Image (cartoon, rainbow, N blue to C red):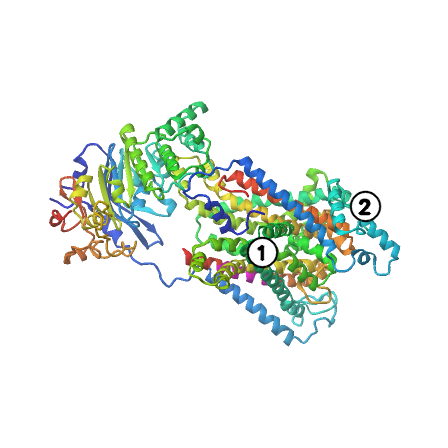
Amino acid sequence: MTITGAGTADWFDVKGTVPTPKNAKRLKDGTIGLITGLFLLVALLVLGIVVPLLSPFEVEISIDTPFLPPSGTYWFGTDGLGRDVFLRVFSAVYLDLGVALIGVLIPFCLGTIVGIGLAVSRSKTLNAVAGSIIDGINAFPLLVLAIALIALLGPGLQSVVVALSVTNWARYARLARTRALVVKQQGYIEATQTLGYSKPRTLFKHLVPNVSSETTAYALSDLILVILLIAGLSFLGLGAQPPTPEWGAMISDGRPNFQVAWWPVIFPGLALCWAGVSLSFIAEGLTRRERDVKS
Amino acid sequence: MTATPIGSGVESAVRAQEGEDGPRPQPTWEKVLRRTGRAIIVAFWVMVVAFMLIRLSPGDPVSAALGADAAPDTVAAARKALGLDVDPLTQFWNYLTGLFRGDLGASLISGVPVTEMLRTNMPVTLWLIFTSVTMTLVISLPLAMFIAMARIPGLPYLFRTLTAIGLALPSFLVALILLYQFGLIWQVAPIFGYDPTFPANLQYLWLPSLVNCVVLVPVLSRVLYSSILDTLEEEFVETGVVRGVRWNRFYWLYVLRPSLAPTVVLLSYMMGVMVGSTVILEIIFALPGIGRELVTAVTMRDYPVVQGIILVFGILVVFLSLIGDIVASLLDPRVRLT
Amino acid sequence: MSVNAMASESSDVLVEIRDLVIGIQRTRKDRLLIVESANFDIRRAEILGLVGESGSGKTMVCRSLIGTLKRRSASIFAGTIKFDGMDLAKLEERQWRSVRGSRIGYVPQSALTGANPVMTVGKQLGEAIRRNRKRKEKDVRRRVMELLELVHIRRPEVVYDQYPHQLSGGMRQRVMIAAAITQDPDIVVADEPTTGLDVTVQAEIMKLLKEIRSELKMSVILVSHDLALIDEVCDRLVVMHAGTCVEVGSVSAVARTPLHPYTIALNRSRIDISTPGAPLITIKGNPPAVGEWPAGCRFSDRCDFVQQDCTVGRNPVLVEVRPNHWSACLHAERLGGTSE
């Protein structure tokens, strides 16, 4: 009896190149994006504090000739009223991001509570009516509904926040309700009930965390949209009013003279992109990391 | 709407009905009928929301519009003209019956009926939406397909980074820059004006549509990209290869079409965002659409016009997402409409 | 007896797989081997079972037979797959087109995802028929009906216009079998064709494959991790473990007198329903992960009969221990009597 099988010579060549088990210390997917995003965001927030503190100029007071191009003194040039664009761009950081954050947090809390409430409640009529109103509100483009509400409330950042709260909660409510209904169906919720846990305990220990993890993920991407929306409304003259330093308002302000002086438009625009891109990278990084863990 | 924008949700909706619990056919016509019925119900609530919006305003909209020092009888006349002088239920009834007669009220400022304004301005907005969607699809489909199939190392990474940036770009800034570059420097696009006749209007529409693409292509192409990747993992692609299907048929029937449903559903969801951004674009590009009318009416506090236009916008979005969902279900019979 | 002798034994050999090495080229120098040594024949009109745990490389061997390794970024590094004068291991994409479908049919792993969800059953089958020669629409339809009846689908005229997701899992898999045999291939590759189906449906599918073999005289290569399911329909078995064929032989020989400890363990781990209360035996440890194979015999870590010489050197190769019964165990002779 002779041995059969591996008869060919290239056997050993192939075998010789087997090595390297999986690299265990590999960075998770998306980590680089997440770190870049966080770095950009922190940098923007730091500049938002440092620049107004150290700048020798005043935000709302004319300091020199209008439309001076960027130079050693005025890094981003001066705007149509002779104000320092560099200072104004970074003075707007906390205003823009803060209003956006409030504009997301209020609808987020409101919508999550309503959504979970609807999912938990047994009333069919309540669910039908509330569900229809939620659908009705969601049907409107957010910007259009916000514009209409501002028509009633009068322009201003406060109106923007109110308009966002009144309209955007419905998106969170629908998301929370759908998610809560799914979670409710899952085995472990039923298990907690058979174990005799109290209802509030089930609700807050199991239902709320599960639902809010989903709505939080949405809130992060929503924050980008809302930042752009607030700047957009201000650009239309419905949000922040001059002379408040706000990116959208500044862009709108500089627009008529864009051909003469690009800097009062482009720099606030870049700051707006900076904020958006940093959040976008963070959101992207987080989702990719999560997917990497799962697979 | 029935479909959620989050990719995983759509996929699980698609997969949920693939269980082993036997066949549960849902004929196409039944699906479409049900979905249309739902759209009609939502449209009704859109009317309700549009109606309530003005009534819920703090203070009196009429005196706000006419100014605090307007003569009392002018205010009273305006109230009567707006139908605000009766109880809310009668108001709602009048509003609804008015809608079905095609009466949306008239402008407080110019006295022009709102329907008249819509007749002249609506086509511009519709054209802008149509060209934007077409351009977005024409760019997104090949782009996503190429990146998913080309297997060039590093390309998906670049693609994801660029789209992540694209997601965060403000459309009005992009519009300003493109208008400056194309309209003033290169002079290849008109900077204002509009021609309502068909091929001539494209000259005015292509640049604003391009701006909409900057916003929509990143969202759409990345959803389509990951959807194609999922499809390529599926075994039926293997079956198609073994079956020896010709390449053009293969790419369409075995790769693209099974991946399209989440994208179309997302597109129909994105309609809201896009209709919103057309408002800003109409202002920047000075297009005489209803978005521009809306902003004018808001600054003038012309309530009947505001109410009429947001109603139309709401119904438009309901209608567009209805079409989107139906197209998705025709493309992929697994999609369930509720 | 040499490798070539393995073939010359029987003149009715259809496919001859020798020293097949399949893996993934991760970087220019870094290769990950998934299949290291596949050696077996497929004979004319036989049902050949390919058994092994997940990760043993069964699916990769199947893919090499239908030329779709590249889609999973894997490729053949060495070895030959002789089929009708061709070497499938070296075939160009263009040449594959004349082999796939018409010479080798394929039944996908899962009935759930194996059928194209956006095409009706009639369209999918018609597409496969129409491929080579132009045919009239009516003829195509008639042929599809014939095929559907052949795989015992009730009311084929209804099923013709249905989408896969409207069918039950068993029906779907019947349709996929019909699709695989449309062009009268010589071999049908069925990669775990009963995944996710009910036990009773599994048995029906097995019966169907057997019928097709005897009616159409096709060879069937049937992949499974479930020895109990396939040993009733198969003529011969190939047992794979960690990328290596460890035992090849007729079903009766492999089942009754297994010559490899892995096969013995597989046999034992079957749930014995005829003796109530019999202990449930499992194979100890997990199959070694791809790329982390031990030195010597890949089964040595888990083997009950392990000897010192098992853990050194290279992976043992197949030896014809009995006539037409090969084993890759160094101590196969001594195992001869230890079966159940």
Asked whether disc 1 touches disc 2, contact meaning CB atoms under 8 Å apart, the reply is no
Q: Is C326 a magenta residue? A: no
Question: Is B60 in front, or is B322?
Answer: B60
SS for callout 1: helix
Query: Mainly helix, strand or loop, the magenta region?
Result: helix
Give the residue type at disc 2. Val
Q: Quadrant of the C terminus of chain A?
A: bottom left
Identify the subunit bearing mark 2. B
- Label 2 crowd bin: few (<14), some (14–19), many (20+), radius 10 Å: few
Q: Secondary structure at mark 2?
A: loop
Q: In this picture, which residue range is highlighted in magenta?
A: A275-286
Q: CA distance from mark 1 to mark 2?
A: 39 Å
What residue is shown with label 1?
A173
For mark 2, what is the residue? B112
Q: Residue at x 24, y 32 (%)?
A: C44
Q: Nearer the viewer, residue B26 or B92?
A: B92
